[in-house]
Image: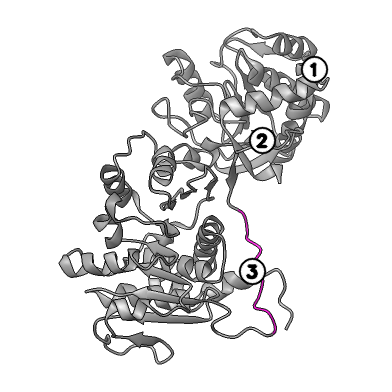
């Protein structure tokens, strides 16, 4: 769906131009976009007084239209416009607004502030005067709404271009999501985010917002091998591997094994543990996917176990210690998914000679260089495929910031990979299931509790629950 695409500023500009080329004028599109935003503001304001802060461009033009629509709906509205309109559409919108317009916000007070100062095109910091005006108005309005983007946040990165930018209660994305809507630190300032459709068509190669997957239940005649055999390669710290298997058993695979050098203490009775030589264990042709890394260790033994995994040519998820040990020369032709946190991502970029500024750019560059799907996990997880596909995850509960939850994610992902999901889709499914499970768990859970709750989120993603 077009509603899930995430566009850069240049992609958004091109998408709008396609609408203009079809015969819609800039002013007509402004009425559509601002009219949709005005309806949101009207409902949020609930009859309360509103101040609209307008800039000189078309984002400011949106503000004049919003103000006019709110007056028509019965709201008390004033406009603060420190700079006169500079585009034809903004000038026309200004002329159609018949209420008061102030060049200074010094004496303006209301209950709701609508920020239409700057939108998607802003790439440099606000001037000191404008930044001060924005902070002053925000401080005097108990509720704040940003139209398209909060002023002072870079559209393509979520970077804060100024210090001490205000927080907003709601941000109304016009036409399409921008990267800032789902990227920290900017995302943390936006409050609730809502999309206002304006008729933007599909953009080839656009990034996507991670959505609820559609997962099929097993066929009626399925058995454990047809549902997928997932094997977790353990190392010197067995607890992490056991957590991963616990999650893998609950994420769709029909059979989960732990390949360990020794049997861990008090293993689950339903977990098959093999202590054969790793090379012999990996020779099982029924294995559909591997996971290597959680609790692996970083010594010579761990390195040999990683090399055995990479020599198997089986679809593989690499996590944790495996990512630290990995070097480009170890890679073959097998399907790989890597799940680094920020520290591991930095190590991988150094190992693979990847140089990029943002974590999104690093994930994409690493995926291209390594040929692996890269899940750059964190509070704003990015999923990048070697061919250019990109997905951004909405925020997950901050309660996920507890030891062991990364092992759970890796186990879910390996399980989904073993069921036959495309590697990129398996990664997207796993990240969604991980975040949704955390939401369902509520506050202050352990990694083991998270792993045991995975079936609850899997049930929410099933296409059909019929027996």
Q: Dot 2, how many residues are within 10 Å of its Cα: few (below 14), some (14-19), or many (20+)?
A: some
Residue 69: percent from left, percent from top = 79, 26
Residue in the image at 28% along x and 52% along y: 329
353 left or right of 372 in image: left
First in sequence, mark 3 or 2: give its number: 2
Q: Is residue 128 above or below residue 335?
A: above
Front-most of residues 300 and 74: 300
Name the residue carrying label 3.
460
Relative horizontal placement of residue 427, taking residue 174 as reference (left or right): left
| Distance from the alpha carbon under mark 3 to that under mark 2 | 29 Å
Residue 204: x %, y % from top left: 65, 37
Q: Between label 2 and label 1, give the one nearer the viewer.
A: 2
- Residue beneath disc 1: 25
- Region in magenta: 211-220
Q: Determine the secondary structure under disc 3.
A: helix
Colour logic: one colour
Q: Nearer the viewer, mark 3 or mark 2?
A: 2
The local secondary structure at tag 1 comes to loop
Vertical arrangement, residue 171 with respect to residue 221, above or below = above
- Element on which disc 2 rests: loop
Residue at 71%, 46% in the rendered image: 1
What secondary structure is the magenta-colored segment mainly? loop
Check if residue 214 falls in the magenta segment.
yes
CA separation in Å, label 1 and label 3: 43 Å
Asked if residue 52 can be seen in this view, the reply is yes
Say which quarter of the image contains residue 120.
top right
């Amino acid at each position: 769906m077009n509603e899930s695409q995430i566009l850069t500023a240049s992609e958004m500009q091109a998408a709008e131009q396609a609408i203009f080329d079809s015969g819609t004028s800039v002013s007509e599109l402004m009425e559509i976009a601002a009219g949709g935003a005005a309806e949101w503001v009207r409902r949020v304001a609930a009859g309360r007084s509103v101040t609209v802060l307008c800039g000189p461009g078309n984002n400011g033009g949106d503000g004049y239209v919003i103000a006019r629509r709110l007056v028509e709906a019965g709201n008390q509205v004033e406009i603060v416009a420190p700079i006169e309109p500079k585009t034809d559409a903004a000038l026309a919108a200004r002329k159609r607004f018949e209420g008061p317009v102030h060049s200074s916000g010094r004496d303006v007070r209301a209950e709701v502030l609508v920020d239409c100062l700057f939108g998607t095109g802003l790439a440099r910091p606000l001037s000191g005067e404008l930044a001060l005006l924005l902070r002053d108005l925000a401080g005097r309005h108990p509720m704040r709404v940003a139209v398209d983007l909060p002023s002072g946040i870079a559209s393509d990165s979520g970077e804060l271009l100024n210090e001490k930018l205000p927080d907003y209660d709601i941000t109304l994305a016009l036409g399409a999501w921008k990267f800032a809507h789902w990227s920290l630190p900017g995302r943390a300032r936006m409050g609730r985010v809502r999309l206002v459709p304006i008729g933007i068509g599909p953009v080839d190669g656009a990034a996507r917002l991670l959505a609820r997957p559609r997962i099929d239940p097993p066929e009626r005649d399925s058995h454990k091998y047809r549902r997928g055999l997932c094997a977790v390669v353990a190392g010197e710290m067995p607890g992490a591997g056991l957590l991963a298997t616990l999650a893998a058993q609950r994420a769709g695979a029909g059979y989960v094994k732990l390949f360990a050098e020794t049997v861990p203490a008090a293993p689950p009775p339903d977990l098959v543990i093999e202590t054969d030589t790793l090379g012999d264990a990996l020779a099982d042709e029924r294995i559909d996917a591997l996971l290597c890394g959680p609790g692996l260790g970083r010594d010579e033994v761990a390195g040999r176990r990683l090399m055995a995994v990479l020599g198997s040519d089986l679809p593989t998820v690499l996590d944790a210690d495996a990512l630290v040990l990995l070097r480009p020369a170890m890679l073959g032709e097998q399907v790989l998914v890597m799940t680094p946190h920020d520290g591991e991502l930095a190590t991988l970029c150094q190992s693979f000679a990847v140089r990029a500024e943002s974590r999104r750019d690093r994930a994409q560059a690493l995926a291209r260089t390594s040929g692996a799907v890269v899940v750059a996990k964190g509070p704003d997880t990015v999923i990048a495929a070697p061919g250019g596909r990109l997905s951004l995850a909405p925020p997950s509960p901050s309660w996920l910031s507890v030891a062991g939850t990364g092992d759970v994610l890796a186990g879910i992902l390996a399980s989904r990979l073993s069921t036959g999901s495309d590697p990129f889709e398996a990664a997207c499914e796993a990240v969604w299931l991980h975040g949704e499970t955390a939401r369902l768990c509520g506050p202050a859970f352990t990694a083991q509790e998270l792993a045991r709750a995975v079936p609850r989120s899997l049930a929410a993603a099933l296409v059909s629950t019929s027996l």
